[in-house]
Every structure is written in structure tokens, then in C-alpha cells.
Image: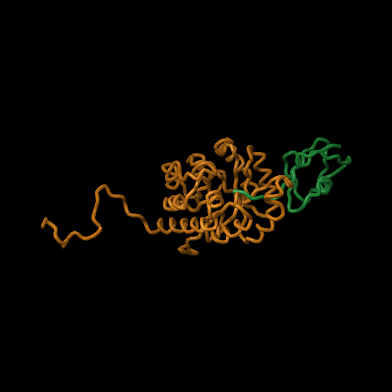
Amino acid sequence: MNTTTNDDALVLYGQKFASRLLLGTARYPSPTVLKAAVQRAKPAMVTASLRRQGANPAENGHGFWELLRSLDVPVLPNTAGCHSVQEAITTAQMAREVFNTPWIKLEVIGDDYTLQPDTFSTVAAAEQLVRDGFHVLPYCTEDLVVCQRLIDVGCQAVMPWAAPIGTGRGAMNPYALQVLRERLDVPLLVDAGLGLPSHACQVMEWGFDGVLLNTAVALAQDPVAMAGAFADAVQAGRAALHAGAMQPQQAAQPSTPVLGTPFWHHA
Amino acid sequence: MNVLINLQPHDLPEGATVADALAAMQARPPYAVAVNTVFVPSTQHPSHLLHAGDRVEVISPVTGG
């Protein structure tokens, strides 16, 4: 299935992307599976992070760098694990140099149990990073005013969570997410908390512009097949949005014509 | 003088630079560097002087979500 056309490309900071799915690179069973999942999903971008060199050579090291380069997919570095404005800004600057990209997924964590973003620090960091030329994609809550403040400081897209990172629970606050879509004109991408392709399809039907996910694919029994399922779901949701859904009705209405029903009133 | 490079203590001579610290830990590219939580661009590695007690962070790409 491929219903995405060039006319319906995702546009972020003036750059067009054929896919509306952004895929994380963590927690896969192996680098080989990660690569196959990315090739199946054909995402707009893949996320990556930065850690102290030598901290975990078994998982990462130079092998991951080579794999990343072989994917030929734009990289979206993140500031995962940062808890302050200074940490996030420094990490973003380091990421820009390592990955040679202005893109940054801004994460400033405010609570370690829920991994809920510190929205105050996120706005402050976003303001400085935008001023410094970054293309900031901020991970935030579904709070309308927070999202508006991020836009006010120059973010050209925002990424509210559906649910806490890694929970796979789907949209916990459908009302607030749909209000965001009604009230905000910038691209909105749901980031974090999606567990099923139907979760992704649902937010796309609501008019979200894309989704970013990782764990739902990486921890599936067959990550490659699940990557494809999410890619298809995102396209299906987008196509349904454009198709225009019927309005729900209170009363049942037979879809098969009643006129001429055999045996009717003969019982 | 003693500096911390990725939390490991290293004894470097007075006047040592970020480039010296990278050589001391045998850093492998790609990497980026911060000293005392402030980013130091690669163009400044040969000239950025370190001081006793400095905390040098050398980071590299890893998987992420």
C-alpha cells in the first residue's frame, strides 16, 4: 500500500519527507534486525543519541555509526536523558557536530518515573536552540498552552506524547490531542506511548501529521513485520483523514435496501 | 594535573589541551566534546586549554528513540 504522494508530503522546517513515520533505533534484538526494520518501514528519519564513548561498547560503538550511515535515512539526534536547559543545549550542539545536522529532537526530562518532559525547561531550551539555527522537534506533553509556547519561541512543529515513553498504551488523552489539532496550525507529530499500529492510525485519522515510535517496533516478536504494519497504518490513517469519515449516528440504519425484502410482514 | 575524562581520572601535563585529553583516552571518531558541560567545537580541540579538576565529556553516537 502506498497512498502517499508528493503533494501530500510531510513538511518540516521547509523540508519535504515522503514518509510520515519517524523510527527509533534502540532496543532491537540485533543490528541486523534494526536495519531490516528501517528498510521495511522507510521512515522519514531515524532517531539516534549520544553517550560517553566506551560506556557500552557491546551495544554501540563504531558498528552503530557504520550501520547508521548505511541506512541512507536522515538522522534525528535526540537529547534523551537531559534534565536541564544547559544539558540539553550542550548535547544538541554536540549532536550537530557529530551528525552534521541541524535537526534535534529536544527532550528535557522532568520526572524520572514517568519520563514526563519538563515543559518549562523544554520551552527555554527550544528558544535558545531555535535562535542558534537548530530545527527543533520538541518532545512535550499534550498541554495546549505548552505547545503554543513552543510555537511562540520558533518551533515549526511540536511532538506531544500519546503516553509515557515505552508504555505502548496509545493515546491516553484523546480529547486534549484532538484539541491540539483543532487549535494549532503547525505540523503535529505524536511521539512516545504508541503500542499498536491502530494507535498510530487513530492519531493520523485525527489529523496528526506523523508519528515517532521505537519500542512498539523494537520489542515486537517480529520487529520487521511490525515496522511494516506501522508504516501501513500511518498511511491508512492519513488516507482516511483525506477521505472524510462519516458522522456517527445514534440509531441503526440498515445498509441493505429494505424495499423488496422477501417474506417481510408474512410471518 | 588531574582531569576527569568520561568520569575516569587522568594525569595530564600543565598546558594540556582537549586534543591531548582525546589522545590520552585513545578516543575514536566520531565524537564530540564538552568541558564542564560546555560544548567545545572540534576546531578548538588543539587550542582549548584544560585546568586541574576539569570534567571532559567525550560522546559518540548510540542507538536512541
Q: Residue at x 10, y 57 (%)?
A: A266
The quadrant in which residue A138 appears is top right
The chain assigned the colour orange in the figure is A
| Coloring applied to the structure | by chain
- As drawn, A243 above or below A112: below
Chain B tint as drawn: green
Q: Is residue A16 visible?
A: no
**Residue A229 appears at what percent x and percent y?**
48, 57
Q: Is residue B29 visible?
A: yes
**Residue A160 appears at what percent x and percent y?**
51, 44
- As drawn, B11 above or below A50: above
Badge count: 0
Q: Residue at x 78, y 49 (%)?
A: B27
Query: Looking at the image, which residue sits at the far left?
Result: A266
**Residue A149 appears at what percent x and percent y?**
53, 41
Q: Nearer the viewer, residue A129 or A69?
A: A69
Q: Nearer the viewer, residue A248 or A164?
A: A164
Q: Residue at x 31, y 50 (%)?
A: A248
In the shown orientation, is residue B37 left or right of residue A246? right
In the shown orientation, is residue B34 left or right of residue A129? right
The quadrant in which residue A140 appears is top right
**Residue A209 appears at what percent x and percent y?**
48, 53
- As drawn, B7 above or below A242: above
Q: Quadrant of the C terminus of chain A?
A: bottom left
Q: Nearer the viewer, residue A15 or B20?
A: B20
Q: Nearer the viewer, residue A131 or A198?
A: A198
